[in-house]
Every structure is written in structure tokens, then in C-alpha cells.
Image (spheres, grey):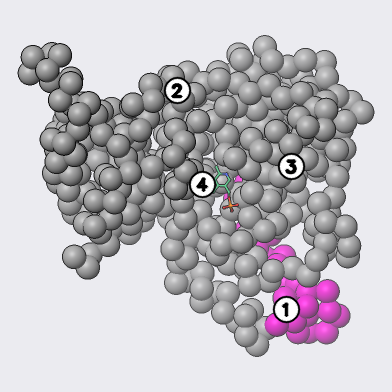
Amino acid sequence: MNKRIYLDHAATTATRPEVIEAMLPYLGERYGNPSGLYSLGIESKKAIDNARLIIAEALGTEGENIYFTGGGSESDNWAIKGVADAFSKKGRHIITSKIEHHAVLNSCRYLETKGFAVTYLGVGENGIVRPESVYAAIRPDTIMVSIMYANNEIGSIQPIKEIGAITRRQGVIFHTDAVQAFGQLPIDVDECNIDMLSASGHKLQGPKGTGFLYVRKGIDITNLIHGGKQEAGRRAGTENVPGIVGIGRATQLALEDMDNRIKNECELRDYLINRVLDEIPYSRLNGHRYKRLPNNVNFSFQFIDAEPLLVMLDMSGICASAGSACNSGIKKPSYVLEALGLPEDVINGTVRFTIGGENTVEDIDYTVDTLKEIVGKLRESSPLYEDYKRYNKI
Ligand SMILES: *Cc1c(COP(=O)(O)O)cnc(C)c1O
């Protein structure tokens, strides 16, 4: 078996050849420091400005509102701690959800140790935060709402526009972790009243260790790294020029074929969902059926454990994941699936498939055929399934 079908694009993506090609000169002959006043430096500065402009346009904003960072986690940390630090005199209450990425959740937990109060909103069975619950949670001392654009495990797309309308009216800063959505879905920060937005390069076929934070003009969050005047003095340090060029090029390419990719991925996604639900008994789809990322599928298979399933899928050349990559290796049920109210035995049998541009119908057919076989085999040796059959006299 030397075929490999990669279905873990929510964990990371392969850097596109065009992105590598765009980066290479800046790892080689174009090594100038962007702060230099000679042409070698000015070339680097121009390349950064160009990437900033591409990203700003993708969000419907201006370049001066984009700050390059070292990835999604850094952007989330900066957004949350930066607001907390700068606005603590106004209030010390933050609202977020139970299904955020660890970069948001653990930043909030850290702030709780510093005297901030955090409300962790629950979600419905479909994995979606209710805008009314955001409204109800806002207090006079609330300074920030942080709700992700789309969830990394179950793909559920959040009502960002509705939440943005509420936070704007209430005068509360609205941050969204758009790491899974940026490059996959069209985003307009003004239309949605988003004040801050995090994204990451390696989730959109760009390089790892790159990202950005969008900050609406006039929102004065505390600077992340004190030092030189890079990134308007807010995140000092000589810029990662090749990385910034890479995330810029990746964004440009993602925008160019976004409509096509959404269409293709939705087709493959729905084909995978329908085949599995039709052909594998005791399987369920987690998250909202339609309000989900074009590339995300998350199934629970009753009576079995995801771990041996993933190992056997890997032996057949299929890369999938048990929910979030950050949790793999740790035997702890996914907090996202817990927030949906799923019982532990269902959570234990949960596998995430995330599709990418290179996947084909043949890949999906092979995956479903393999899955059917493996799930069948694992159930044959499952005491849970034995009990179920005996109890229901099957
Ligand atoms: C991957 C991911 C992050 C972290 O991004 P990194 O660039 O890997 O630090 C944050 N939030 C979400 C929703 C993610 O999927």
C-alpha cells in the first residue's frame, strides 16, 4: 500500500508549489532587512507591503490594520491578552464559547488567574452558539467577545454577522478566531462588525509559523513585542519575510479559486456524508448538516474506539484525525463533542475527515469502502456491540 489519501486538512495543509516558488527568492538572494534604506532592503519591504495588501483586500479592509504574527495561536493570544491588558480599567469580563480552540480557551483561563471573569457559552446540539446567549451574557463590565468563525473539529460555522451586530450595539470588542475559515469562506470584517480576526498560514496551504491579526483602526490593544518599529511598533522584531510572502501568496491563490473549491469540496463532503450514513449502521454526523465548513466531516461510530480505527485507516493509507490534533495522543474526550452533549461512548468513536483541493471522488469511494470494512471488523470484536445485540435480541 503506497497510496496516501490525506484527509486531515484542518490539522495542516501541504504548502502549494506556487507558494514555495514565491518564497524561495526571500530565502536566497533577496535577504535584505526590510528596515534597510538600500534597494536590497526596500525590495523586502515591498514584498511585505504587497502581502499585507492582499490580505487586507481579502477581508475588505486596509493594509494598516493587518499585523503579521507567528501563527494562529499567537494571534489569538495577542488579541485576548492585548484587549484584557489595555481595557482592564473599563472592565474585566470576557465572553467566549466552550468550543473554542485551546489558543483562545487557555488564554482565557490564564486571564482568570489574573482576576478576569470569563463566561464560556454553551452551544446547541448542532455546535452553534446562539446570538441571544451572547446578548444575554453581556454585562456592564464586559470588554470582549471572542467567538470562532468556524469550529476546527465539527466545522460548524458560527453566526458571526449576528454576533457582530450585537457587540457593536453594546460597545464591546468582537474578536473571531478565523483560522479555519480564512481562505475557505469569503469574509468581510466591516459587514460582520468584526473588530479583530486571527488567521494562520499553514491552514490555507501557506507556510507554518506564519499568521496575522487584523485589528480595527482605533482599537488600541497592548503591543505584543516591545522593540523596534516593525508592524507599526506593535509586534517588534525583524520580519519573517519569506513566511509573510508565503502567507500572502497562499491568500491570493485561495481567493482566486475559492468559488470553485467551495463547490467541489461541498460535493465531496456531501457524498462522503451520504455514503457513510447510508451504508454504515449506527453512525452519526456531528455538527450542523449545512452550516459547516465545505471541507469538514465529523462522524461518530457507535460501539468502537477511534484510536484503533485511525491506526487501521493509516495502514490503508488514509490520514484522518480523532477531532482536534492538539488532543491526539491524550486519552481525553473532546471538549467540543462534550459541549454538544454527546455521551462518552459516542465521543470515543469519533473521527474527523477534512477534505482538500487535491482529493477526488475516487479518494472518497476508497475511504468509505475501507471505513466500512474496518468499522465492521472492530464491531465484531466489540463487547459493547455484543451487549447491544444481546439486549436488543439482534
Ligand atoms: C490550527 C488552529 C489554531 C492554531 O493555529 P497555529 O497557526 O497552528 O498556531 C487556532 N485556532 C484554530 C481554530 C485552529 O484550527
**Secondary structure that dominates the magenta span:** helix
Along the polypeptide, which appears first: circle 2 or circle 1? 1
Q: Residues within 10 Å of mark 4 (few under 14, many from 20)?
A: few
Could you give the CA–CA distance between mark 1 and mark 4, rounded to whole angstroms?
Answer: 38 Å
Query: Which secondary structure lies at badge 2?
Result: loop
Residue 45 falls within the magenta-colored stretch: yes
Q: Quadrant of the C terminus?
A: top left
Q: Which residue is mark 1?
A: 43
Closer to the camera in the image, 362 or 189 = 362
User: Disc 1 vs disc 3: Cβ atoms closer than 8 Å?
Assistant: no
Residue reaching furthest to the left: 394
Q: Which residue is mark 3?
A: 79
The x and y percentages for residue 307 are: 33, 44
Q: Residue 326 got which mark?
A: 4
The x and y percentages for residue 109 are: 70, 33
Q: Quadrant of the N terminus?
A: bottom left
Magenta stretch in the rendered image = 31-59
Along the polypeptide, which appears first: circle 4 or circle 2? 4
Res. 260 visible in picture: no
